[in-house]
Image (cartoon, helix red, strand yellow):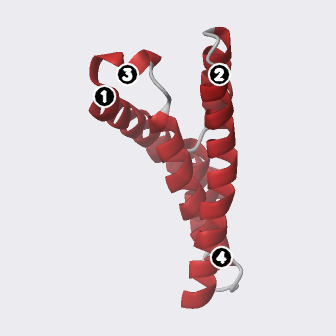
């Protein structure tokens, strides 16, 4: 049963990531979106990291339904966020000899994701 909940969460998270990423890129960079700095990926990673922080923080109370926690945490947030795309986009910038942009992409995705996950954990601890 829990695997089905995770699959359903992933079925929501993956297309949500695709649509949100494309929307942010097009809205920010217009026709240059495919070659621009990958802001859309950063946005989905930050939203997912924050949400997962809140979910894990709520789960720590022991009151959450384990199936719902798995569906939202592993399924939805796992499919929404993307380490692999961040890695490929970083390498795309390296290959284009945009080393500074590559460093900013890698640093922003990892560093800021940790910060917003901690913020989510803190907010959950304050609420529950």
Badge 2, how many Cα within 10 Å: few under 14, some, many 20+? few
Q: Quadrant of residue 63?
A: bottom right
| Distance Cα–Cα, label 2 vs label 1 | 19 Å
- The residue that label 3 is drawn on is 33
| Distance Cα–Cα, label 1 vs label 3 | 5 Å
Numbered disc in front, either 4 or 1: 1
Q: Secondary structure at mark 4?
A: helix
Badge 3, how many Cα within 10 Å: few under 14, some, many 20+? some
The answer to whether 119 is drawn above or below residue 82 in the figure is: below
Numbered disc in front, either 2 or 3: 3
Q: Which mark is residue 82?
A: none
| Distance Cα–Cα, label 4 vs label 3 | 35 Å
| Distance Cα–Cα, label 2 vs label 4 | 30 Å
**Residue 1 visible to an observer of this rendering:** no
Label whose residue precedes the other's in the sequence (1 or 3): 1
- The residue that label 2 is drawn on is 88
């Amino acid at each position: 049963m829990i695997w089905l909940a995770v699959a359903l969460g992933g079925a929501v998270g993956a297309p949500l990531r695709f649509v949100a990423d494309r929307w942010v890129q097009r809205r920010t960079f217009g026709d240059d979106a495919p070659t621009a700095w990958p802001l859309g990926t950063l946005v989905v990673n930050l939203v997912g990291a924050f949400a997962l922080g809140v979910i894990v923080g709520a789960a720590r109370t022991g009151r959450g339904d384990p199936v719902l926690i798995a569906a939202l945490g592993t399924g939805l947030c796992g499919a929404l966020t993307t380490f692999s795309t961040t890695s490929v986009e970083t390498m795309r910038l390296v290959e284009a000899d945009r080393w500074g942009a590559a460093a900013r992409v890698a640093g922003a995705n990892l560093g800021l994701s940790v910060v917003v996950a901690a913020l989510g954990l803190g907010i959950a601890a304050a609420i529950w």
